[in-house]
Image: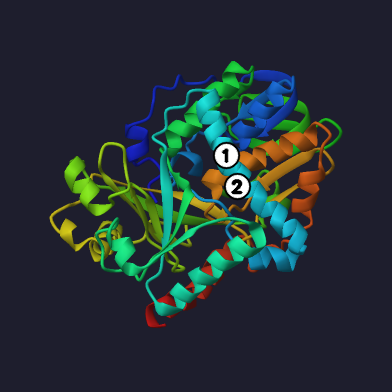
Amino acid sequence: MSAEAESYYSATAHPWPTQPLLRGELRVDVAVVGAGLTGLSAALELAQLGYKVAVLEAQQVGWGGSGRSGGQIIAGWGCDQSKLVALLGREDAKRLFDWSVEAVELIHQRRQQHAIDCDWRPGHAHVPLKPRQVSELRHWQDDLQRNYGYHTQWWSREQLGEQLASNRYLGALFDANSGHLHPLNYTLGVAKAAREAGVQIYERSAVTKLDSGSRPLLHCEHGRVQADSVVLAGNALLSGVSATVENRVMPVGTYIAATPPLGEARAKSLIGNDMAVADINWALDYFRLSADHRLLFGGRASYSALQPPGLRATMLRRMRAVFPQLADVDFEYLWGGFLAITMNRAPDFGRIDGNIYYAQGYSGHGMAVSGLAGRVIAEAIAGQAERLDVFQRIRHRPFPGGKYLRMPLLATAMAWYKLRDALF
């Protein structure tokens, strides 16, 4: 993918002053690798507790998934709750779900406390295309209500049609507590709050080597940072720093396009209540309206570092399958980014060597739970590791095939799921 291509988000981002390059030697309590929402959240929480914190970012704040994503804020995790029950048992699976709800609430708290203008809109719908997916969603709804006390609404096809001008779907599982926002502006808002709390942020300061020990040492091209604790928050973009952590996630490319402004009336004729929408195919489509009345349409996963051929034509075809009434509309922006998945799609939070902490593998739910991940790690560094200990009980395995074969092997496996979506 073309990482340099301008996204709609970067074109509409709030002003952000360029942060300095790390030069020379620096000594801090905690060094954070990555200025996305995981790293910034951990840094903000720790600074508020009185720690001296530095954040090292290889590019610019929000350059990765935190500033490129679909912007959907969804309670829950990348795997369904039955997987977490199998991995942890019912009690701890319930804790994880409750913490995912806390993650959504944390976004609201930070928006309000730090006056972050990020175009928040409430409401999210998971939509089925096949009868088996209707059954799956109804089962999810029942399980969430009965075992987790979480209320959602089931909409019939007719009820959905009152809000969504598409005949493609058979109904919807609607969650009024989830929603969507401008991801880059939210990330920049958290970064601003972190700076105001005393966090030092260094951009264009990629970590090239990490020496572990009682006081880990991070090497950059023009400087070094020594810290009592380190937080690895690179997620899909953490490459060459810690093989132990990196091998347990797979970077997956995902792509988003933005139409020109459609005008308020035409935009609202597509999605009347301004909710975010996602289907539940393996190769899913997800879409929503922007604050300036564009349609943002995402999907088309790629299991390599290369942009898929014919991407624009494919994305247009998928958008028009949902909204045939947009046959006359092209895209003004088209961009991509990486998310990280784990083998079991469960989150991978933990620590290595006692003082190196990490969180990764959000498997599509990162915009919400990355903030919670930063909080959990900050708690552990401050001596309250109970929540991190629960996450560490989830067993994770490296992807088969090693660094070079894991992507082709995963692409082969995913081809079956795409075929199943098409046929059954």
User: What amino acid type is highlighted by mark number 2?
Assistant: Val
- Element at badge 2? helix
Other-residue count near label 2 (Cα within 10 Å), few / some / many at <14 / 14–19 / ≥20? many
Q: CA distance from mark 2 to mark 1?
A: 6 Å
- 347 or 107: nearer the viewer: 107
Residue picked out by circle 1: 105
Between residue 288 and residue 16, name the one nearer to us: 288
> Quick check: 3 left or right of 148?
left
Q: Is residue 17 above or below residue 108?
A: above
Q: Residue at x 54, y 19 (%)?
A: 20
Residue 123 in percent (x, y) is at 42, 49
The answer to which image quadrant residue 394 occupies is bottom right
Tell me what residue is drawn at x 37 percent, y 49 percent: 275
Q: Nearer the viewer, residue 40 or 243?
A: 40
Q: Are marks 2 and 1 in contact (CB under 8 Å)?
A: yes
Direction from residue 404 to residue 212 in the image, left or right: right
- What quarter of the picture does the C terminus occupy? bottom left
Q: Mark 2 sits on what residue?
A: 101
Q: Is residue 25 above or below residue 339?
A: above
* Residue 234 shows in the view: no
Secondary structure under tag 1 reads helix
Q: x, y percentage for residue 420?
A: 44, 80
